[in-house]
Image (spheres, grey):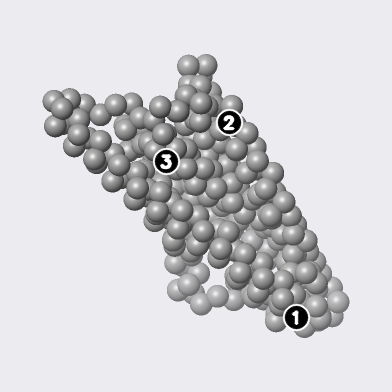
């Protein structure tokens, strides 16, 4: 990375955005997204408090507990990397560049976990509906915990390279002096891609090939396919119950309907480009 590219990257980070873009970012990412993330953390905390009770020992409770914990971690990382950036120049120029190389890998690891835990409890519901007589054997809390632990380890390994994609450098002026944050005595910093982060082959394989398949195409395909089966199965089961004079759904059907709704909301959110991808795009643009 050359001296001039350091300056150009610093100018990009320091706020040389169009005023309209800056205002939109301030209101959307700062004033709108921040309360939503805080509300999400509070709601997830309540979910964790309920699911950690001794009476809540089931496979679904284990999956939902892990999902709530990783979702909370992802929300906290979103606040640190997205929501606070437009609210403070000092935070954007001094704090964010120093924490981003550490918060970003944690965020994408948490995102990977939430995606595949959602897929896992969808598969679990599929097994419960497809093999109702074997629910007590196939769908246990112990098995769910083992699956969540395996997903956690796999997610850490899959995202291990992200810890080596960027570095932090102080912003230096044309005369070799450190550039300070406006109206403070704090130094400005900028994130610079490492040799790995700026490698075109790595970007094509990891970000284009693996990310689209592991984080988008495969999980969404599985979720859509399995949930389509679940919806049809529950609909038929309820129709059979009505025909037999019992219009009340059983426990497994009610649980399945609840989780189908959760998954459908997840799919809608996952199809859209996430804030994590926005961070990645901004970072890779610095290598000019």
Q: Secondary structure at mark 2?
A: helix
Regarding residue 285, the answer to whether it shows in the image is yes
Q: Answer few, some or many: residues within 10 Å of disc 2's Cα (few below 14, many 20 plus, some between 14 and 19).
A: some
Picture coordinates of residue 63 (x, y %)? Answer: 52, 35
- Are the residues tagged 1 and 3 within 8 Å (C-beta)? no
Please name the residue that numbered disc 3 is placed on.
Answer: 126
- Are the residues tagged 3 and 2 within 8 Å (C-beta)? no
Horizontal relation, residue 218 to residue 234: left or right? right
Give residue 286's quadrant in the image. bottom right
- Comparing 90 with 218, the one in front is 218
Label 2 or label 1, whichever lies nearer to me, is 2
Q: Quadrant of the N terminus?
A: bottom right
Q: CA distance from mark 1 to mark 3?
A: 52 Å
Q: Secondary structure at mark 1?
A: helix
Please name the residue that numbered disc 2 is placed on.
Answer: 143
Picture coordinates of residue 7 (x, y %)? Answer: 74, 78
Please name the residue that numbered disc 1 is placed on.
Answer: 5
Q: Answer few, some or many: residues within 10 Å of disc 1's Cα (few below 14, many 20 plus, some between 14 and 19).
A: some
Instruction: Tell me the number on the disc at residue 235.
Output: none
Residue 55 sits above or below residue 104 on the image: above
């Amino acid at each position: 990375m050359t001296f001039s590219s350091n300056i150009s990257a610093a100018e990009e980070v320091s706020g040389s955005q169009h005023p309209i873009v800056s205002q939109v970012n301030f209101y959307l990412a700062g004033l709108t997204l921040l309360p939503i993330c805080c509300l999400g953390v509070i709601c997830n905390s309540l979910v964790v408090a309920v699911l950690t009770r001794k009476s809540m020992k089931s496979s679904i409770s284990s999956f939902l507990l892990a999902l709530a914990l990783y979702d909370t971690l992802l929300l906290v990382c979103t606040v640190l990397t997205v929501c606070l950036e437009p609210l403070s120049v000092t935070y954007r120029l001094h704090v964010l560049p120093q924490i981003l190389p550490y918060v970003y890998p944690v965020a994408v690891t948490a995102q990977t976990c939430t995606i595949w835990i959602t897929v896992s409890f969808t598969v679990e519901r599929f097994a419960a509906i497809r093999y109702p007589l074997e629910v007590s054997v196939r769908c246990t809390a112990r098995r769910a915990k083992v699956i969540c632990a395996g997903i956690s380890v796999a997610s850490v390994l899959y995202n291990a390279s992200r810890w080596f994609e960027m570095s932090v450098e102080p912003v230096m002026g044309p005369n070799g002096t450190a550039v300070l944050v406006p109206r403070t005595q704090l130094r400005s910093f900028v994130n610079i891609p490492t040799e790995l982060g700026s490698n075109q082959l790595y970007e094509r394989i990891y970000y284009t090939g693996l990310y689209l398949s592991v984080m988008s195409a495969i999980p969404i395909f599985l979720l859509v396919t399995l949930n389509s089966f679940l919806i049809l199965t529950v609909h038929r089961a309820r129709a059979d119950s009505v025909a037999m004079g019992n219009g009340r759904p059983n426990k497994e059907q009610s649980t399945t309907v609840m989780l189908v709704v959760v998954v459908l909301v997840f799919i809608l959110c996952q199809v859209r480009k996430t804030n994590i991808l926005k961070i990645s795009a901004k970072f890779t643009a610095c290598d000019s």
